[in-house]
Amino acid sequence: MSEFFQDPPRLGNQYDEDALLRAYLRWRLPPDMLADIEPDLQRLGHRVATDVLALAEAAESQPPKHVAYDAWGRRVDRIETSDAWHALDRISATEGIVATAYERRHGSCSRIHQMALLYLFAPSSALYSCPLAMTDGAARFLEVYGDDSTRPVFEHLTSRDPGEFWTSGQWMTERTGGSDVGSTSTIARRTRDGGYVLHGSKWFTSATTSQVAMTLARIEGAPSGSKGLSVFLIELRDANGQLRNIRVERLKDKLGTRALPTAELTLDGTPARLVGGEGDGVRKIATLFNITRVYNAVAAIAGMRRAIALASDYAGRRTAFGKKLVEHPLHVETMAQLQLELRASFLLAFRVTELLGKEECGTATPSELQLLRLLIPVAKLYTAKRAIAVASEALEAFGGAGYIEDTGIPRLLRDAQVLSIWEGTTNVLSLDALRAVRRSDALAAWTADVRRRLSSVNAGQFIECVGSAKEAVQRVERYAAHAEDEGSEFQEAGARAFAYAIARTEAAVLLIEFANSVEDHAALAAARRWCAGELAPLVNADAGHREDSLGLFGST
Ligand code: MFK
């Protein structure tokens, strides 16, 4: 009897093998810029399939530990992480995964360069992408709201020197939950020297090993709600490396993100610096979380790409029923659908990246600023949900092997699941998109932008696609006007479908524009297939619909 062993999937250079990324960069970047940055991308593309990947696997296999006491009973609250986790920190610095965005060597396109680096790095980082997201968000916050006294911290956060590089936490979640930030109960007390000390509990703090953290607290006497909150910068440790009046209660036992230390903390007189002045803390810290939400979208497409790369390679190796998986028509259909999802989400995430780069460099028009405000929550919520679905389907493409821990495949799904939870759940972000529509002219800016872009696509092969996209825009516009007349319950109940409609329609326009520019058969097929699907799955959430929903909700 011959023994049968399956051939595991292999990863090659993740830049060279990614035709979508390379075509996108050729489309959007000036040729001299691409020539300048391509060696970096190629090097990182190789590393994330070799040494960086090995470090990520090592970090996953040695999760962080909380050492509460030393051998003599002294409270020490050390969080011990693996050597591999520390190595990932150093590599992030030298590869400039945050720094590239702030050096701005290529103006607003630097964000595209930086997010391309993140896209390659994230799936081989064991979630080191999380501290980097918060670090980037904190750097942007300090750039906007900081002063000379916070400049050294900004320099650390954006350094390429591993000896100088710092990461930042973002402590926004308390026991009341991660969504309703306005109910934050941490108190800031003024000290005699004009500083502050913080007292309170932080229920989820990601990457507690960071050197600094940005957090929210209510200065004693300030009003309740989000307007009464202020943003504070904490330097976590003193000169001896001891936490400054911070108690680590425990590390969280999580479904995924297992190399990432996530802790419950008590702040008990922790010295902190007020940044950005008193009050309006939620509005101010939005500068930070809008960056982490873009990171989330890029991490989502990066996770999809990795899952598809592994499953595609495997399809060329695995034989079943006498032929390779890639020769089975139904398997090809399944993989093609995953590629379509990736392409749509990829273009959406990079569209937001482009707008972010312009905003940061001061070159965005007022209309582009409104687009950014609307598309950040839309891209974050949409790509996160698709990343989970793609990871699940890709797992299935491995059969039973996809369910076995030591193949490493289940991690793709576990780590995808967090994407729709942290940085705002799907529903919270749907309501955020609605907030953007209600409080600004973001929808008018978006419909005008989409129509303008569609009208510049003249090629006959896109007539049907353009027609479908135009129809979808019109439906979204009519729906929004009707929903406004119907009132806030109607708007809120339909908000997720509304956000999806914007995401899918924006993706349609991007797929058309991309196919029109790159003249590649797969791009054309993607645009056609996407536009033939449901672009605007809106929900008529009138009183009858909502009553039915209540009935269904309580029906068993
Ligand atoms: C690889 C990826 C890694 C990602 C890293 C993850 C690690 C980090 C883990 C976490 O920290 S998870 C916790 C993250 N928490 C959130 O994302 C919060 C989710 N909740 C929301 O987003 C709520 O919508 C929000 C807290 C903002 C609701 O707050 P409020 O105070 O009830 O809403 P309100 O009054 O509408 O907004 C207050 C102000 O903020 C308003 O400005 P004004 O005072 O001038 O009117 C809003 O316009 C403004 N604002 C709210 N959301 C905004 C925004 N401004 C810009 N952009 C936004 N998205």
Image (cartoon, rainbow, N blue to C red):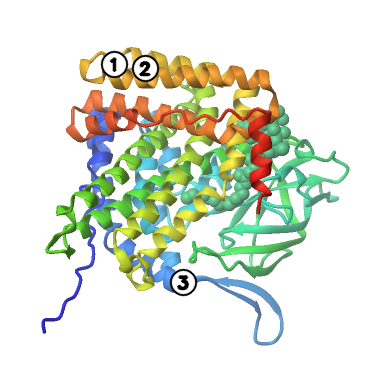
Disc 2 is placed on an element classified as helix
Badge 3: how crowded within 10 Å, few (<14), some, or many (20+)? some
User: Do the numbered discs 1 and 3 sit on residues whose CB atoms are within 8 Å?
Assistant: no
Disc number lying in front (1 or 3) = 1
Tag 1 residue: 457
Left or right position of 367 against 177: left
Left or right position of 282 against 344: right
Q: Report if residue 112 is visible in the image.
A: yes
Out of 91 and 321, give the one closest to the viewer: 321
Q: Is residue 551 above or below residue 350?
A: below
The residue depicted at 88 percent of the width and 42 percent of the height is 221
CA distance for labels 2 and 3: 49 Å
Q: Report if residue 94 is visible in the image.
A: no
Disc 3 is placed on an element classified as loop
Left or right position of 553 against 82: right
Task: Single out the residue that lies furthest toward the right.
Answer: 221
Left or right position of 296 against 242: left
- Disc marking residue 82: 3
Tag 2 residue: 453
Q: Identify the image quadrant of residue 236.
A: bottom right
CA distance for labels 1 and 2: 7 Å
Out of 389 and 328, give the one closest to the viewer: 328
User: Do the numbered discs 1 and 2 sit on residues whose CB atoms are within 8 Å?
Assistant: yes
